[in-house]
Image (tube, grey):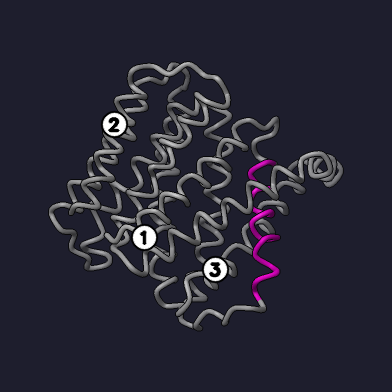
Amino acid sequence: MPLDIILLVLFGALLHATWNALIKAGTDKSLDASLVSAGGAACALPFLALLPMPASASWPFIGASAILQFIYFQLVAGAYRAGDIGLVYPLMRGCAPLLIVATSGVILGETLSGGALIGTMTICAGILTLACEARKGSGHAIRLALANAFVIATYTYVDGIGARLSGNAISYTLWMSLLPPVLLFSWAIWRRGLFAVAVHVRYNWWRGLIGGGGSIASYGLALWAMTKAPVATVAALRETSILFALIISVVILKEKASPWRYLAGVIIAMGGLILKLG
């Protein structure tokens, strides 16, 4: 994988860790997840007129992705309510690329080189190592995290294919971001009432705007990379976001780090190096 693609995917991983930390730190994780989705759509709107429309063949994928993104954000909020981020995040982000590596040959007909396969598996091993340090989390949290790993793998395939068919990965990403917040807020208003949702939006809009901008930029970079490199490799490299999440937790949130975190960091860094050399 070329160095410029690696660096852009890593920057996207940093953005991804940042908006996940915003949701985890929030007081209402479900509404904060909806705000992040809406913030992404708000950031996308000004650029739609400047880009070509996605090719017609990609629109069914945009629709399918919107539904999957709705499910994804619901599971993110539920998993963070049920368990510790040290357990939930690694399981969600570590198992998804494993599923993609195991199935990409059949679904996409992609064949990874030996170096790419070893690097991908090394990154996944490092991410899953982080789950060993978790001290909080129930079986319910684990089930939600694993269910979301399946959803992540599914929408990665849908969007990886859709972006290739669209003719413009950035345009695909921006149009794809518009429908999920409509679904999320419709669901929130039906469950919580308009007044409760409006009050939360009034005091937390900034969280959605910052997180949404990071979310849309992070995913746009990943989808662009998937048009230039194998989906499984990009998906694995993107999950190094957990490493950035750990740095944020230690440096900014002042959380204590066990030896498992440092071991996982070394393993993830080795996986990134193997991907470059492979």
The magenta-colored residue range is: 32-48
As helix, strand or loop, the secondary structure at mark 3 comes to helix
Mark 3 surroundings within 10 Å by alpha-carbon count, few (fewer than 14), some (14 through 19), many (20 or more):
some
Is the residue 146 above or below the residue 47 in the image? above
Q: Earlier in the sequence, mark 1 or mark 3?
A: 1
Identity of the residue drawn at 76% across and 40% down: 204
Label 3 sits on residue: 63
Q: Position of residue 198 (x, y in %)?
A: 84, 45
The residue mark sitting in front, 1 or 3, is 1
Q: Residue furthest front?
A: 3
Front-most of residues 148 and 85: 85
Mark 2 surroundings within 10 Å by alpha-carbon count, few (fewer than 14), some (14 through 19), many (20 or more):
some
Q: Residue furthest left?
A: 114
Residue 16 image label: none
Residue 5 image label: 1
As helix, strand or loop, the secondary structure at mark 2 comes to helix
Query: Which quadrant of the rendered structure holds the N terminus?
Result: bottom left
Q: Earlier in the sequence, mark 3 or mark 2?
A: 3
